[in-house]
Image: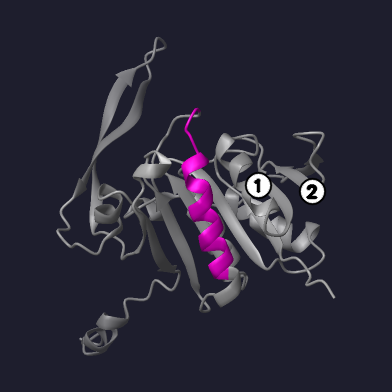
Amino acid sequence: MNKKKPLILVTNDDGITAPGIRTLIEVMKEIGDVVVVAPDSPQSGMGHAITISDTLFCEQVTIKESYKHKEYSCSGTPADCVKIATQEILDRKPDLCVSGINHGSNSSINVIYSGTMSAAVEAGIEGIPAIGFSLLDYSLNADFEPARKYVKAIVRNTLKNGLPEGVVLNVNIPKLDAGDIKGLKVCRQANAHWEEEFDKRRSPQGRDYYWLTGTFVNKDVGKDTDEQALADGYVSIVPVQFDLTAHHFLKELNNWEFND
């Protein structure tokens, strides 16, 4: 008897027609049965935003006539896409949710702002093993071919081994030719941040407006970080948890005198 193929939910934050998600879909079709629910327009930097004060639209679309799997275009955020997929579209819980492949880095502190990773986290909250994939190339003409074998290997291992409750994977892939990627490294998130500033301008109508700019600063000298792995030519894999409790501080916080 043939083993039933895993059901894989595919989403992203760059929009349903972005080259990155098209590559991810093709790879996932080699592994399981695919359903796509993705934003109808770019949603980068949306973090874990959800739609609560506006209507949400989701309709089946045909991106390519030869595709046999179902695809749905959603007016909401990446997290919305996962919610509506699991509650309204799919008839069973998917075996895996994959998000991406994002056009640009989601390593280090970028995971906080990432719509790609927020979709994966939302799936994790709903008890679905999930992975976010990102390529360190912001161009719409980015070459995703070198990422294929690493995406496939990570997905197959996740389906085989599973993930602990409350954990999802954040995978970043360096912008290198296939032969120049050295392999995979399991890492921790680098302690880095953005030094930001606003470029203030004035419109022809006399209104002030702002463009957010900034410089990424990594002061983490550890050799076991995602930033170091990527700089060394490796694909980085960081297990991410969505329990934000600072457990190491609980004991000290309990010693505070709140009644003074």
Is 231 situated above or below 84?
A: above
Residue 59: image quadrant is: top right
Which residue is rendered at x = 70% and y = 52% of the image? 29
Is 116 or 100 nearer to us in this picture?
100
Residue 166 shows up from this direction? yes
Q: Quick one: label 1, few (<14), some, or many (20+) residues within 10 Å?
A: many
Disc 2 or 1, which lies upstream in sequence?
Answer: 1
* Residues shaded magenta: 141-158
Residue identified by numbered label 1? 25
Is 206 situated above or below 259?
A: above
Residue 52 shows up from this direction? no
Image location (x, y in percent) of residue 238: 38, 64
- Disc 2 element: loop
Amino acid type of the residue that numbered disc 2 sits on in the rendered structure = His
Assign the C terminus to one quadrant of the image: bottom left
- Disc 1 element: helix
Residue identified by numbered label 2? 69
Amino acid type of the residue that numbered disc 1 sits on in the rendered structure = Ile
178 with respect to 155 (left or right): left
Which residue is the extreme one toward the top?
204
- In three-dimensional space, the C-alpha distance between marks 2 and 1, rounded to whole angstroms, equals 10 Å
Is 200 or 32 nearer to us in this picture?
32
Reply yes or no: does residue 150 show up in magenta.
Answer: yes
Is 12 or 227 nearer to us in this picture?
227
Image location (x, y in percent) of residue 193: 25, 50
Asked if the residue at tag 1 contacts the one at tag 2, i.e. Cβ–Cβ closer than 8 Å, the answer is yes
Looking at the rendered structure, which numbered label has been put on residue 106? Answer: none
Is 241 situated above or below 131?
A: below
Which residue is rendered at x = 34% and y = 28% of the image? 211
Image location (x, y in percent) of residue 240: 42, 67
